[in-house]
Amino acid sequence: MHILVTADTLGGVWTYTRELVTGLVRRGDKVTLVSFGDIPTAAQIRWMDGLANLDYRPTAFKLEWMLDSEADMEASSQYLKALIEESRPDLLHFSQFYYGAIDCDVPRVVVAHSDVVSWWMSVHRQLPPETEWLHWYCQIVTRGLQEATTVVAPSRWMLEQVELHYGKLRSASVIHNGRAPALFNPYISKKETTVTLGRLWDSGKNVSLLLKREMPGPVSIVGCDRHPDLQNHSFVAETIRPNISLEPQQDERQITQTLARAGIYAATSQYEPFGLAPVEAAFSRCAIIASDIPSFRELWEGAAIFFRNNDSDSLAEALESVQRDRGLRLSQGNLALRRARQCYTSDRMVAGYKNLYHKLAPAEALSA
């Protein structure tokens, strides 16, 4: 089967795409991959080495959630239409809503990774203010979802949000995201360090909650501090306590080492349709301390300790409970590792998509 896949290079969608595309190619499928956002670095595309059945087309078109992206979205849509005519894929797998309405007769899967309205509601507890741009955004998201052959979300919560804000879908399913366990090391001795990974400028990730008051033990906050769509907007911490370290964005090898050593992972998000970073921490046998939001409850109930959403005192209490009790810390790490191995592997994710593709693709593609 030949699948055309779209991605962006600015966040977790790129990691998700890596796992999906690698799994598809290794199972004998041909993939044409198109990326948007920024042209990726050499380190970002290193995973493609040796994937012979992959045709990669990087572009720098803006993403639909970016301001003033209307012209870029139309231009990128025309680019995709020409590429579809050229490469003639059997199925289209889009990580952007806009392309669900692309004019072609090929089955279209749209994956709802996240959206602006549900992000705003989770962070601000109210609908976003009406603007001309937001009106355009909601129109194109609704159109892409309604005209897609089927819609996939990484959690039940995210699927519910999509239908709440953009209307009932004619065909939809949940396929959990996944990571390859072999990339992570759960076997080395742990330190008592708490770590979190995330975009420091993103209120949805809410990593600044760790700075609101003194937290027990050493805490490491790792992530990009500069907004990709606002040139002069970066994260500025008002108070850095002696036990807190702010680290720049790390590459995969560095992240693997950081998580392997850490005993605790703080999943502080107010908004998280799925969350690959907690999965990576779980594969590294970190105890998961998670914000009590619906998606984390759905995914980690029984395998994490929860604190009240956006409550720094509750977060400190949860961290204190595992900092002072080594046995609890180890048992929670083992529970997280077991959950990740059972539910959130890349093999499981790819198998889910393969099953979906087989229902949608034409019969001749399946026999090729």
Image (cartoon, rainbow, N blue to C red):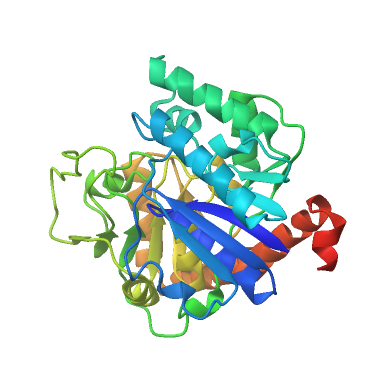
Number of marks in picture: 0
Q: In the rendering, at what x and y percent does residue 248 appear?
A: 22, 61
**Rendering quarter of residue 224:** bottom left
The one of 111 and 94 positioned closer to us in this rendering: 94
Residue 341 makes an appearance in the image: no
Left or right, 17 with respect to 189, comes to right
The one of 314 and 291 positioned closer to us in this rendering: 291
Q: In the rendering, at what x and y percent does residue 210 appear?
A: 28, 50
The one of 281 and 181 positioned closer to us in this rendering: 181
**Rendering quarter of residue 238:** top left
**Rendering quarter of residue 324:** bottom left
Q: In the rendering, at what x and y percent does residue 111 appear?
A: 60, 45
**89, above or below 72, in the image:** below
The quadrant the C terminus occupies is bottom right
Say which residue appears at 40% left-offset and 62% top-offset. 265
Say which residue appears at 54% left-offset and 66% top-offset. 55
The quadrant the N terminus occupies is bottom right
